[in-house]
Image (spheres, rainbow, N blue to C red):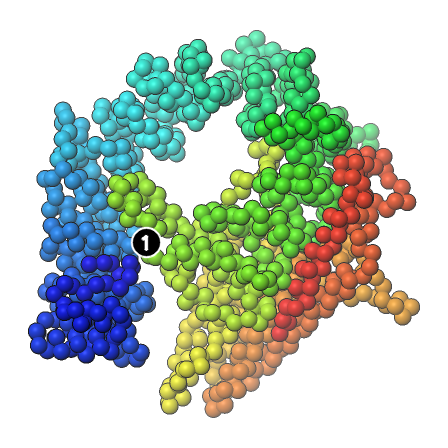
Amino acid sequence: MSPYSYGRPALKGSVDVQLQTAFSDGNWQTVVRLAAKRAATLKDPYYEAVKICAESQLDGTAKKCGLLVAVDELIKNKKTPDIDTIELYEWACRDFLGYEVEYADTLGPLRARWAKAYPGSSLALQCLQACLENWDLVSAQQISTSLDKTYANTADRRYMFWNITLTFLLSISPQCTNASRKVYSMLAVRQLERAADLTENAAKLESTDRGLLTEEEICLYYRVLLSHGTKEEFISRLKSPKLGATSQLKAGRKVLLCESLDALQTWGEWDLIYNLCREALTLGLEGATTPFFLCDLQLWRKFASAASKVTDSESALGEVQALLKRYIDIKDKASEMYKKNLSLALLETTFRLPAATLNPNHDNAGLSPRVVQIGLFLDQYFERLSAFDDVKSYVAELGFEEVKTLMETVLPKIPDENADKGRQTVLKALECKLRYLLSTCPQTLSPQPSVVDGQIQDKAFQCRLCNNPASLPCETCLKKLVVDAANTYRQIAGDKELLGSIPRMDKDPRLDLALVMGTSLLKLSGLRPRSSEASQSLWQDVEPGLFLQAVLLLDTQLKETPGDTELRLLLVQLYLLLGCASYAHQLWTPLDVKRTIQDSLSPLFFDRISTLSPGLFQGTRPLMEPLRSFYSHTLSDKSPVRIWDAFSAGSYTSILDMTEFDGKLRRSCTLMMTLVEERRAIRCYGGKIDCEIEDHPLTENINDETTLVDKTDYGPFPNLESLHGPPIHEYLRLGPGLSNERSHLAFLSEQYLDLLAYKPPKDYKPSRNTNDVALRDREYTLETLSRLSNSLTDFLHHPSTPSRLTAGETSYYTILSLLAAALLVALSTPRSSSDPVPQTLSSLTQSIKSAFASLQTTTPLIPTPQKEEGKKKPLPEASCIATLPEMPTLACIRATALAIRHSAGFVLALDEQDRKGGLHRDVLAQMKVLHELGGKGVGEVKAAVQTVKAGLGEAGWLDRVLDLVFGEEEEEETEEGDEVTRAVEEVVGGRAGAEEWAGRVVESWREGVKGWGMVRME
């Protein structure tokens, strides 16, 4: 027997060669004829099954329905079917699974029935595999229970744990009814409890005993206990003599300790965390384990953190220091990795000590033990790639005096007199990064009076580093930092010896310097995190020249270090924010995001891309193909990928992890983004959408109750910021990131547009009773509109929704909810009614008009250029550039206008189709008003796009961009601005060096607007 997923099954051996040959050749007419003869002659139901399966391969709906009827009859028949018959039917039903045939209701129970009848057969194991691969957990659990009972007294222990694992999976699965969930939960816990008790009480476990032997089995027990047990039970077992975390460590098993510490940390059980960490680290010193087996940084950090939070923290921290000293005494035996871990552990412990212990004399001198430890660590590791990230959080905790001592006294003394220029340069780059970090820390500022000498102060603080009035960050410090970093950068670029030493370094110091300069310039430009409440125009708050300087400088550095992912991702986001989507895509493509991380990294580029630059979807290769291919392949089966391999290997924790990952992937915000962005782009160019979004295989199990999961990973971004402020990626987004609320609203909006655009398939033949058909269609439409109106309103009224959307998106989804409600009222009002149309409709219509006007007002379109002396006045470059990053808002206006127009057109078309029972005349009047409103809005968007296109089509844009970056050559500049601009100019090679970059930027703008020019406005 061969499962259907591996190809066409072979008929059983007793079948004659003629029929076997016809079946293997796919000669279905011959198979039907021969099988019918054999069935009539031999009276064997197997041949009837062969005949039915062969008929299902022929054209014709009736024959295919015969297969479904036969399967249904087999289920209703209480007899145990032949396994070969089941296999045949499963293969024949392969195209119906998930549609006409639900595996868990049909073939799964048939396989379970057979496996329970013949549990000793090797084919029972294949039945279990088939049920698992079709994710029929109910049948799989029943089969595993039978297998467990059959092999209970043998050395093959896997069936016991397969049974427990499947019982647990079923208890947390939607396939389990609410009534059964508690039963299965308790069953899984009790089975493992019995195994744990047996393990604890037995002097020695034999292979036939039903206890817990392997690390995977023990970790499975604790996972189930953590999910279904109580905290007290978990903690009690964690202290047990055989299955406790400490005893497992003695056996060389570390996973349980790591997982249990995470659970205890969420519960705030600091005393137990402290005791476990102390016992674990003591084991290494006493020889119970290898000395550095447990010497990882996370364990030391949890140890020090717990010690600082227990009742007698001073004594506990003293114990931490004592243990750490014992490890330091033997660190010469450790590898470099463990030596560094010990240094970081010493740093962590020092920072967790109370202030009274660090400064017993209450001396405020800057050279505190904390500063000393940072200095000692950097003295050893400042050249390492991770040096800044290692000390960043600690430096941000220092007081001002400590900061001053670190920067002015400690750092300059780190390189010795004989240090080569390479080491000195690396330290300078690190110093620049630390200076930037401190500019984001509040301890570098002190409040100042709002009025000084009768003058109102613009700044609420004074910088303690430069003594100038400041806000966070201090602009004076940032400007000086840009100039100093640029000087160091130029020194490296002009020194052949330094350039030659770079390949031997962990990291190119020019990259660090460029990141410092770039992020400083972004802050100086006025760029701040954009929220839904922020003004819509990027350039309203941002100085274009400084912003473009940052982009240019970072782009210049990318030529030197093209393989750096952090820099490339930063530039991708900056170019998207700048409106250069095509150039951003050129930078994104070399990242070659692999399938396994598509879900977490793709939103960094693809989120809102259809609204920013729909022209990207017009390429030779579909833009969303990598994402669509990833989801289609990974989620093509009902089960997690390679789940049977995990069962075969006995990797029970992997089974749980794979199941959790698969569940989140099927509820991914990125998945919804993929579908919605592609559909919006197709709609922009009048293409054909394959199917309604509700019917898409990837949205099969998504409804309003589903919580969609955002797993976007911002880790690859460079982050020089302290924890006192937002990370850099929040400055660069086009709007709030992916979220459950926004994804659901996008899903519902697509359902609404699908309803408006629905057309029967070409082969659809309506019933002769047209009135009945029209009535059913009307009922379906009203039911759908009611559901969409309620769902849209519910999600819009979630407390967190306003912060998840841009202002344009909020208006768009609000208007869609109003349109759904308006259409519901319009189609529910009979034409024959002598009463006036309900006031609700006019109120809804007015609300739609007001919301649309508000959208246009808060995000004004570009004004049409005014004529002066018979000529068109050139569009100012600032106005033209300001519109390009706001294309997503313009797309919201277009989408809203078209939704209004198509909604009204939908109602008017229904009225024309149904002359006898049409709509009330007042309803039609309201719809005509909305139709006109939508048409006018689309016209304004079209005019705006043409205006931008005309503006960008003018000559001289290269010089305009360079003038924005460096200032006009004849323009007088302030001394401060001149100093920063000169520093940037020298790094990038001046105007001549920036010409190629400016050309790419302008070309990308033009490509984006060209793509918008082809968008349908109807």
314 relative position to 163: left or right = right
- The C terminus sits in image quarter: bottom right
Secondary structure under tag 1 reads loop
Q: In the image shown, does 326 or 193 lie closer to the viewer? A: 326
Q: Residues within 10 Å of mark 1 (few under 14, many from 20)?
A: many
Which quadrant would residue 263 be assigned to in this image?
A: top left
Q: Position of residue 254 (x, y in %)?
A: 33, 28
Q: Camera-side residue: 252 or 351?
A: 252
User: Measured along the vertical axis of the image, is residue 509 above or below residue 424?
Assistant: below
Residue at image mark 1: 639
Return the residue nearer the eye: 52 or 145: 52
Q: Position of residue 388 (x, y in %)?
A: 58, 27
User: Seen in the image, is 122 located left or right of residue 393?
Assistant: left
Residue shown at 80% from the left, 41% from the top: 990
Q: Is residue 913 left or right of residue 79?
A: right
Residue 783 lies, in percent from the top left, at 41, 73
**Displayed quadrant of residue 373:** top right
Q: Nearer the viewer, residue 421 or 214?
A: 421
